[in-house]
Amino acid sequence: MPNLNESELVEQGGIPPIDFHGSIERLREIAEYDLEVPADFNERLSDAVKGLVIPEHVLRAASAALRVGHVVLQGPPGTGKSSLVRALAEAFNVSTFAVTAHEDWTTYDVIGRLELRLTEDRKEEITPVNGALTEAVIRCGNHIVQHFDEPSSPQAEWLIIDELNRAHLDKAFGELFSVLGTDDLVPINLPHQQDGNRELVIPRRFRIVATLNSYDKQFVQSLSQAIRRRFTFISLDSPARRPKDIPWVYDPEHQAPAIREFSYVIQRAAARVARREHSMDHKGADETEVHLLGQLKSLHVGRIGLLFDVVEAVRYAEDGSEIPHLPIGTAQLLDTVELFLTRNIQDASAGGDPDQQIDWAAAVKLGSLFESDLLGPEQLTRFAQSLSSPFSGQFRRELLTIASSGMHFVPNQ
């Protein structure tokens, strides 16, 4: 038998190609390989979620669901859905291809389309353009082959769809419905590709991981039962309420999830500000982070605790309560504390008042969240008037402005 080089082996079908873009139908050769679970998966997952405020049972549920198939992480904004996606991908040793759904999505965005483009010599030509799903699947195949040769490289690529329910999925997914609903390797037809390159088989190692905003339902599309059957839905929410006898303290290892969230927000705010001020100097950023963290712990824990008191009240408000209910997420709290710390540093030489600074940060970062059609103006007004120092200034005025300017629930007449 004559000696064959690698390209000849690929052409003759002896080994799969390292890039399937021009050989889409050959994905079938590697499609049977199912998802590998790294031997050190538990350690990888623990490292990936270090610092995140995500309950252990949610981690275990999400990882088990991904072993089986496609997953939707649902919950209010800011509860760590995107962070959990990245952590899970890292734990499973996969790369990700991320897109954001929108209401104009069609099969052209998901599967593919033909576009008129200009060549380098300014001539027009019709070019096939892969949709998000097609491109992610092809990249997944490329990674599977590379992983055979380099086991430390990602074993696959997954499609990450943010804000899944902003799209009309029944319209956008089209033929994909039948493929996602079976264990058989059913090919998808790619009408935008050339003959001989049109049958796409989705590898068993491929996953779709989507996030879904479960709160702003007035701005999103409902999901049909057909779509829901093809995904496992995992819910994320705000951490459990802090026990009444436990004060707000900086303790990242505390048994109470609320205290761990409090500590995480303080630590991450210090880290963000330090990184921004020393973007080209990692050593300087580390030193500044330690300094800022010490400053927050020694001077501002009580102030930030008062902010968490306000958020805690609205997070866990019950139906019929005088307090409006809003599922404010960890991300919004982190943004607020980061803004407060930045303003505090900036105005230090001018003698700025930290109480006024955190009141301002709450007004400009959290105030807009109360512009919800689920909140009545009377309830919002009563809540604003109940706020005490340091949030009885600008934050209160912001809420009263919202209540009086029509940015609230208007009942049907």
Image (spheres, helix red, strand yellow):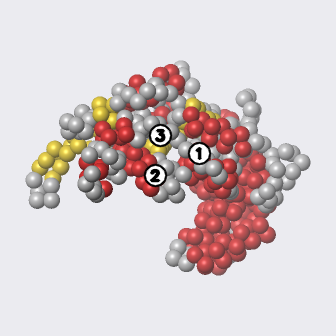
Q: Earlier in the sequence, mark 1 or mark 2?
A: 1
Q: Position of residue 116 (x, y in %)?
A: 17, 45
Name which residue type carries label 1. Val
- At a point 61% along the width and 79% down the height, the residue shown is 284
Label 3 residue SS? loop
Residue marked by disc 3: 33
Q: Position of residue 59 (x, y in %)?
A: 66, 43
- At a point 55% along the width and 44% down the height, the residue shown is 36
Residue marked by disc 1: 37
User: In the picture provided, is 290 more to the left or to the right than 121?
Assistant: right
Label 2 residue SS? helix
Q: Residue furthest right?
A: 245
Q: Please determine whether, in this image, residue 161 is positioned above or below residue 172.
A: below
Q: Cα distance, mark 1 to mark 2?
A: 15 Å
Is residue 390 in sight in this rendering?
A: no
Is residue 272 in sight in this rendering?
A: yes
CB within 8 Å, label 1 to label 3: no
Residue density around tag 1, few if under 14, some if 14–19, many if 20 or more, within 10 Å: some
Query: Which tag is nearer the camera, tag 1 or tag 2?
Result: 2
Q: Cα distance, mark 1 to mark 3?
A: 12 Å
